[in-house]
Image: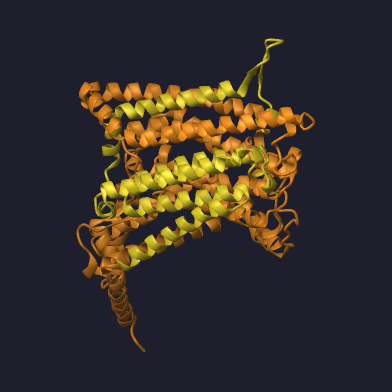
Chain colours: A yellow, B orange
Amino acid sequence: MGAQFLIYGILYVVAVVGGLMVLFNRDTVKSAMSLVLVMLALAGHYFYMGQEFVGAIQIIVYAGAIMVLFLFVIMLLNMREREVMPWYLRSSRYTGAVLALAFFFLIAFGISTFGAVEVASATARPAPSNNEIFSMLMTKYLVPFLLTSVLLLVAVIGAVVMGRRHDPETGEEYLIDDEEMA
Amino acid sequence: MPTLESLIETLQSWHLDFVQFAGGFVGGPENVLVLLFAFAKIGLVLAHVLGFIPLIVYGERRIIGLVQDRPGPNRVGPFGLLQGIVDGVKLLLKEDFIPAHADRTLYLIAPGLVLVPAFLAMCIIPFGPVIDGEALLALYTMLGLESLYTPSSTLPLAITNPNIGILYVFAMTSVAVYGITLAGWSSENKWSLLGGIRASAQMISYEISMSLSIIGVLLIVGSLNLYDIVGSQESIWHWNVFAQPVGFLLFLTAIFAETNRLPFDLAEGESELTGGFHTEYSSMKFALFFMAEYANMITASAICVTLFLGGYHLIPAEFVEGIIAWVLNFISSSEAGIPILPGTAALLASALAPLGIAIKIGALLVLFIMTRAIWPRMRYDQVMNLGWKLMLVAGLLNLLITAITVGVLAGIGARRAPSPADVGASIDAAIQNGKIVLFFITGGLLLLVDRWYARRRRRKLAAAYPYFGRSIGKTAGAASP
């Protein structure tokens, strides 16, 4: 019990501190790196619960792919500290507040529906084997799984369409320049 | 004067006392053994990788010297073997310089972020077989811990052996991008930044080909676990390189790109970028980048060997075991009084297995070095074209062909195909999760409205203040009315 408590405690502190660093860092790159830290701490939780597959996917997808793209975009746009929060985005604060409240209620709803006790006992449950997970994807969750791939395809095509502009005078297609992107 | 036997006996009983004492903290003496063996394995792997890096650097310079018809380093120590140590000392004594304009925090953590994932990925490489049964009993007896042996206890010669195996490797390699990217960004130097951006773009691009190239192997073996993958390649004809030649070539190319080695070392590109992402680094921080490059090469080679070249299998284990058993038999029969435990031959054979993987890793490292000696650096658009237009397509085709072949060989009906009932059940499951989906759709719509509102305000203001034109909204306070 002692060692388990210690490891969960460390991971918990890292995740929470990382989350606070995401919020309070004015530097975009540091904020993104703090988010990576949160993702890694969450993956640590999953690993320690015995849910190795979820943990590995957490690192590969979030820490390894999404956050690298975030960082890549930040670097390409060369966003330094002074450029956070353009004035015309200030109205977004209210949207953000509404979304944050809604998310809080979603979490509260989740915990009240499924119960905190059951979440804790997930640790004791044996982790499903890789084969079980993959056959679930191919049977029980087939439709959501396929829909996800369609969604990704739409996103890729959308990115290409948004990246290209049609010049009405010459009829030429050209890639959007960073002047317009910013 | 205590005799040797009594000394060994005291030591052995002390071992047992310690293990039983520590067992009180971690839930049983077996766990202490697991922890102790884990620490021993971590120490051994770390020491070997770190210890071999200077030798590899030396070997690289000598081999390139050979290729270019010049001697290479040959003055320090016999054949110049101590050159690595001298270089290390030189780097240690150099001034540790931090540019005034650099982002200090990120600048300081970047070298560590490059080095750590390389070592983390080494954690799951199987260096030898799983020791169990008689061999493990022999090991426990030698340590004086035979009372802790149970028939179910095993000792895999890998630091850890998770079921997700290869996914863990991908998790680590995907995190490896950060170090180089951040080093380039935090230096606040345009060459470094260009190097960092190039590195991240290249590593993201080739990660896809790398993942695709090994799915063929996973399909053939039917498991993600590295011990299962190595176990299926026991004899040389079962090495995956023969079943998956295209996959092997793609993987090999991808690891060259992932480790930023020639012909893909655009992140450094000294002729264009004066050194790329590590331009602003000096002294030991530069040495860390240097070490990380070689640690990454070792790790990538180890993964390649494990997946495609039979892992630690080199000479059949029974053959080695037979020779060792014969030698042991000779010793015990010639000098009475040295009893040989029954599992010793198997134990020693397992202990020699890491030599097999070490030889193969060495061979791949020579390939890395020779490639550097004979290939020019590629142009950036060539790198991107190769990754996205050739390797990705080849990987997908290879996957398709392998999947069909494996499916046909296994018998299409052997595995359960999705039925109409599954489709219905999965739609039900999707509807059950609909509340959460609804939440995200609502949130997304809110964001869209918000974006539209912000854009309208920006347009209005731009129309009202034509002088600012397009520059309105680009900087925080300056253009704000």
Q: Looking at the image, which residue is at 62% across and 20% down?
A: A164
Does residue B149 sit above or below B454 in this rendering?
Answer: below
Residue appearing at x 50%, y 60% in the figure? B47
Residue B455: image location, x then y, percent: 62, 30
Give the answer, above or below, for where B179 lies relative to B344: above
The residue depicted at 24 percent of the width and 50 percent of the height is A126
User: Which residue is more in the foreground, B16 or A53?
Assistant: A53
Q: Give the residue at x 27% y 68%.
A: B27
Q: Is residue A46 visible?
A: yes
**Residue farthest toward the right in the current orientation of the protein:** B467
**Residue B303 visible, this angle:** no
* Rendering coords of residue A2 (x, y %): 32, 68
- Residue A61 place in picture, x, y as percent: 45, 40
Closer-to-camera residue (B158/A82): A82
Q: Nearer the viewer, residue B78 or B180?
A: B180
> The C terminus of chain B lies in which quarter of the figure?
top right
Figure check: B147 above or below B303: below
